Amino acid sequence: MKKLSILALLVIGLLVFVGCEETPVSTTLEWTTVATEWTNDDEGQLSYVSQEGSTWIDLGWYEIPGDNTSTYEMCFLEEENYEVANNVLTGQYTDNGDDTEIFYDIVITFDYNASTDQVSFSCDGEGILEREILLILS
């Protein structure tokens, strides 16, 4: 009787395991299939660049949004320094103000809205992106 119970549990476990469907993980950023250059009214920009076998993402914005006399911040995310899963980028970046090429950890969550044709994103990490930034670009 004990052997039958164990066998029944194994069969049920196998059926449950086989019956579970794995949710597919997207490893591309959805907004890159729509456009590779995004800007907003405050002259913030998001670019996805592929050139000579290299791919990177540029993020740029004025320290004071809309004030083009303030400092323009720029961050660079090279493809070999990040991974993407379901529009969440996890990796490292450098910024234009850092002459020593220090890499900072970052998690960026992108949201592409097809009905408004806009991309928004928020950042959580180190360096100048350590504060959460939300830029809506179209």
Image (cartoon, rainbow, N blue to C red):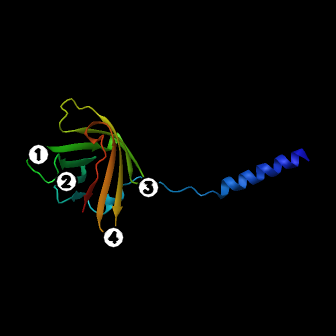
Q: Residue at x 11, y 51 (%)?
A: 67
**Which SS class for mark 2?**
loop
Q: Is residue 24 left or right of residue 1?
A: left
**First of labels 3, 4 by sequence position:** 3
Disc on res. 44 = 2
Q: CA distance from mark 3 to mark 4?
A: 20 Å
Query: Residue 112 location, x and y as percent?
Result: 34, 61
Q: CA distance from mark 2 to mark 4?
A: 21 Å
Q: Nearer the viewer, residue 55 or 32?
A: 32
Which amino acid type corresponds to the residue marked 2 in the rendered image? Answer: Gly
Q: Earlier in the sequence, mark 2 or mark 1?
A: 2
Going from the N terminus, do you reach mark 1 or mark 4 first?
1
Identify the disc placed on residue 50: none
Quadrant of res 77? top left
Which label's residue is closer to the chain start, 1 or 3? Answer: 3
Q: CA distance from mark 3 to mark 2?
A: 26 Å
Percent position of residue 10, x then y: 77, 49
Return the residue at label 4: 115
